[in-house]
Image: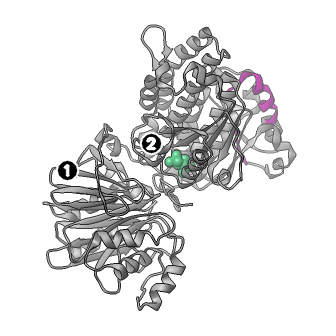
């Protein structure tokens, strides 16, 4: 959600800023802009719409300089327009800045600033910050920032250029991510790691209200009072190509194709596959004593991460016999929930920067409840603040639609449940060994599914005009259906809903009419016959039925117009295979419809505001 980049150094800043903005485009945006010091003045260029619009302006009116900031804006306050795009400046023309986040008290501040003579030109909350900084600025940028941020409520990541000090970039953030790094030709700032990877792998994550001052020769850090502080670096070993599209037409397809590797990399962190596969006990946060004190687990996430949590719930209940609830972070944070002793809060997040999930984490910490994050980004807010982190090793995920991150989140949750089950005696060593040896075969099975994707593409080419699609299943398959429905609606804009198969008859079956596509997910032998009956009920009412099954489940074909089978596997492991055809189906439906697969309308990759 919005992207910030900045560079000061020996090179021309403009192409570096444009490349960085292009890398961050996956976060979602509807306008873009840059400001560059050209040796005499700070020149701003901005435009509504795609980055190509800004690039066309820069081709006509080039800007060259060694220090600059850039921004892709995802509109929150004020419509997407030239006037509302960033950068924004102050009336006295002392500074320009770009901003991510939301200033919650902007109306109050704006009224105060208007009374003091500030002339606002945009509808944004961001301009309030620029005007406020302009009002408190007396020649010392650091002092102005420390004074201004005291008055700001809400979330912000700011990169600021002061006209008096135009080769330095001043940055500060609160509840909105920023990462800085020093490359061989200068200092860089970005909202997310992929934009820095071409320049450096050693990056520093900014903490709340910390200030970074980037100059062509280094980066200095200060606390919120302006006192110098030391900050270490984190080495990022993501493959640079992992953040590039390569020969794939879309990141989403590339990331689906990376799933066997992402799965294996993640599993290998927690399982030793030498000889007899075994969990690496020291990679999990529980000692034997500790695990016995866990009385209840609550899993929190948003969107796809919440759906991974729903599968996690099934795993913890089945393997560790622990009561579990999975909840959406934005609901949980305002639920006046009373934590109980012995409760553990799992926070699931790819980015580690989702505002509502961070809020839930902080609630639990305040209540003294143990927090465990399942997270893909080292150094992100959630990874830093949780008591323990179980990392996923999906690598950078650029497509807005989560695919490989979901798969790796489910992997970590499955293995964690098994670890707890082993300690608590609810999983025998034999059962664990058998599950783990089947797990070792999953990447090859996934690969075969991906290799056979032509069938799914063909099916999508016949079904893409569907207006409504229902996904139904029971138990684990219901949790999978929810993710399958989200994937389809977010990338193809087709209305899709997940329904517990047994619940259809209680109302929703009224929506089934001639030709409605219903996808049944049947991977659990003991529930398959029941879901098959539900498929028959919709088939006889005219639905076009597709079933996805685990191996040879009996009596399915007669209820469906099409059956997709994946290779038989233990039912607990079935989600690792079943999700791939569902993701591919969503992808191909979107491609057939000509949708912007990697950047669906209205969506942003990292939801850093409420
Ligand atoms: C859907 C999707 C979103 C995210 C959600 C949480 O494909 O990507 O639903 O899963 O915004 O994001 P993270 O995992 O970064 O907390």
Asked whether, in this view, residue 338 is left or right of residue 551, the answer is right
Q: What residue is shown at x 29% (from left), y 75% (from top)?
A: 45
Give the percent coordinates (x, y) of residue 513: 79, 50
Q: Which mark is residue 170?
A: none
Q: What residue is shown at x 49% (from left), y 85% (from top)?
A: 112
Considering depth in this image, is 409 or 561 the residue closer to the camera? Answer: 409
- Asked if the magenta segment contains residue 532, the reply would be yes
Asked if marks 1 and 2 touch (Cβ < 8 Å), the reply is no
Mark 1 CB near ligand 1 (8 Å cut): no
Asked whether, in this view, residue 556 is left or right of residue 163, the answer is right
Badge 1 element: strand
Q: Is residue 562 visible?
A: no
Considering depth in this image, is 490 or 557 the residue closer to the camera? Answer: 490
Could you classify mark 2 by the number of other residues whose Cα lies within 10 Å: few (under 14), some (14-19), or many (20 or more)?
many
Furthest-right residue in view?
506
- In the picture of the structure, the residue carrying the numbered disc 1 is 183
Give the percent coordinates (x, y) of residue 149: 42, 69
Give the percent coordinates (x, y) of residue 351: 46, 47
- Asked if the magenta segment contains residue 526, the reply would be yes
- In the picture of the structure, the residue carrying the numbered disc 2 is 253
Which circle, 1 or 2, is nearer the viewer? 1
Badge 2 element: helix
Give the percent coordinates (x, y) of residue 76: 52, 69
In the rendered view, how is the structure colored?
one colour
Q: What residue is shown at x 45% (from left), y 85% (from top)?
A: 113
The magenta stretch spans which residues?
516-534
């Amino acid at each position: 959600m919005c992207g910030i980049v900045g560079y000061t150094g020996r090179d021309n800043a403009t192409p570096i800023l444009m490349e960085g903005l292009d890398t961050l485009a996956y976060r979602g945006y509807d306008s873009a802009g840059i400001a560059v010091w050209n040796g005499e003045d700070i020149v701003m260029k901005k435009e509504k719409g795609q980055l190509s619009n800004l690039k066309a302006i820069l081709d006509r009116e080039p800007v060259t300089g060694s220090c600059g900031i850039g921004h892709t804006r995802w509109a929150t306050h004020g419509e997407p327009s030239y006037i509302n795009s960033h950068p924004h400046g102050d009336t006295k023309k002392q500074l320009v800045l770009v901003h991510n986040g939301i200033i919650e008290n902007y109306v109050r501040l704006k009224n105060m600033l208007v009374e003091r003579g500030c002339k606002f030109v945009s509808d944004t909350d961001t301009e309030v910050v620029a005007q406020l900084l302009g009002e408190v600025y007396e020649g010392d940028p650091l002092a102005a920032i420390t004074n201004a941020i005291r008055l700001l409520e809400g979330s912000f990541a700011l990169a600021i250029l002061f006209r008096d000090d135009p080769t330095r970039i001043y940055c500060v953030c609160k509840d909105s991510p920023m990462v800085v790094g020093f490359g061989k030709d200068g200092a860089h700032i970005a909202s997310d790691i992929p934009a820095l990877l071409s320049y450096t792998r050693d990056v520093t994550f900014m903490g709340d209200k910390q200030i970074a001052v980037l100059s062509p020769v280094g980066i200095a850090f200060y606390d919120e009072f302006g006192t110098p502080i030391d900050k270490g670096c984190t080495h990022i070993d993501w493959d640079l190509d992992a953040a590039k599209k390569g020969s794939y037409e879309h990141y989403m397809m590339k990331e689906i194709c990376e799933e066997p590797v992402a799965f294996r990399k993640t599993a290998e962190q927690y399982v030793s596959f030498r000889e007899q596969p075994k969990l690496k006990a020291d990679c999990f946060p529980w000692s034997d004593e500790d695990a016995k004190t866990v009385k209840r687990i609550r899993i929190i996430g948003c969107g796809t991460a919440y759906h991974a949590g729903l599968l996690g719930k099934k795993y913890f209940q089945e393997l560790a016999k622990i009561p579990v609830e999975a909840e959406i972070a934005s609901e949980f944070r305002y639920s006046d929930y009373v934590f109980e002793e012995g409760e553990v809060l799992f926070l699931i997040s790819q980015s580690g920067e989702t505002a509502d999930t961070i809020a839930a984490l902080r609630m639990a910490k305040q209540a003294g409840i143990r927090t465990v994050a399942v997270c893909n980004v080292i150094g992100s807010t959630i990874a830093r603040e949780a008591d323990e982190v179980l990392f996923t090793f999906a690598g950078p995920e650029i497509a807005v639609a989560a695919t490989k991150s979901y798969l790796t989140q489910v992997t970590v949750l499955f293995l964690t449940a098994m670890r707890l089950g082993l300690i608590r005696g609810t999983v025998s060593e034999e059962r664990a060994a058998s599950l783990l040896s089947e797990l070792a075969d999953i990447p090859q099975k996934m690969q075969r599914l991906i290799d056979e994707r032509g069938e799914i593409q063909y099916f999508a080419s016949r079904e893409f005009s569907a207006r409504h699609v229902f996904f139904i299943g029971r138990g684990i398959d219901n949790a999978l259906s929810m993710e399958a429905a989200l994937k389809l609606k977010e990338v193809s804009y087709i209305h899709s809903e997940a329904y517990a198969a047994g619940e259809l008859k209680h109302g929703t079956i009224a929506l089934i009419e001639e030709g409605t596509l219903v996808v049944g997910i049947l991977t659990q032998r003991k529930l398959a016959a029941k879901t098959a009956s539900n498929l028959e009920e919709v088939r006889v009412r005219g639905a076009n039925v597709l079933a996805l099954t685990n191996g040879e489940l009996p009596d399915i074909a007669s209820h469906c117009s099409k059956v997709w089978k994946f290779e038989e596997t233990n039912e607990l492991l079935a989600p690792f295979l079943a999700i791939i055809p569902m993701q591919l189906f969503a992808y191909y439906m979107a491609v057939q419809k000509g949708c912007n697969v990697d950047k669906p309308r209205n969506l942003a990759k990292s939801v850093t505001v409420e």
